[in-house]
Image (tube, rainbow, N blue to C red):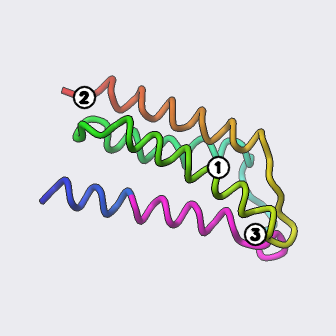
Amino acid sequence: MVMSVLIAAWCAFAVAVAAGCLVPADRLPGRLPNDKLLHLLCYALPPAALAPTSGRTAAGAAALLLLGLAVEVAQHFVPGRSFCRRDLAANAAGVLLGTLAGLAVAP
């Protein structure tokens, strides 16, 4: 039961991150924290939260990496947004750091 709730929360968070990344530029708040830091944190939190409780850490990390790539590609079609390799790198760094942090605290 707990694992089902965690997986549902993980999926909801991933959908929220993807949706936030696909908002047209003119609808974004005027003041946001550093863009790369946001990417890093948003992609680090899900694997850090799930790694201690799941044997599917690698699959979750791979899914997040693919989500990050898909979002960057989709941004090409969103007004005022574009594909950015540095965002992709920040996403990957977040997945790596989150996975390592989660595994470090795993029982």
Q: Name the amino acid, label 1.
A: Leu
Main SS class of the magenta portion in the image: helix
Which residue corresponds to the image point at 75% horizontal and 62% vertical from the top-left?
A: 75
Cβ atoms under marks 3 and 2 closer than 8 Å: no
- Mark 3 or 2, which is nearer the eye? 2
Give whichever of 42, 62 is nearer the camera.
62
User: Cα distance, mark 1 to mark 2?
Assistant: 28 Å
Report helix, strand or loop for mark 2.
loop
User: Cα distance, mark 1 to mark 3?
Assistant: 23 Å
Q: Residue 22, how many percent across, how many down?
A: 69, 68
Which residue corresponds to the image point at 35% horizontal and 44% vertical from the top-left?
A: 49
Q: Is residue 3 above or below residue 60?
A: below
| Label 2 crowd bin: few (<14), some (14–19), many (20+), radius 10 Å | few
Where does the magenta region start and end?
11-27
* Residue underneath mark 2: 106
Cβ atoms under marks 1 and 2 closer than 8 Å: no
Q: Which of the 4 quarters of the picture holds residue 47?
A: top left
Q: Name the amino acid, label 3.
A: Pro
* Circle count: 3
Q: Where's the C terminus, which quadrant? A: top left
Q: Earlier in the sequence, mark 1 or mark 2?
A: 1
Q: Is residue 100 above or below residue 48?
A: above
Q: Which of the 4 quarters of the picture holds residue 9?
A: bottom left
* Residue underneath mark 3: 29
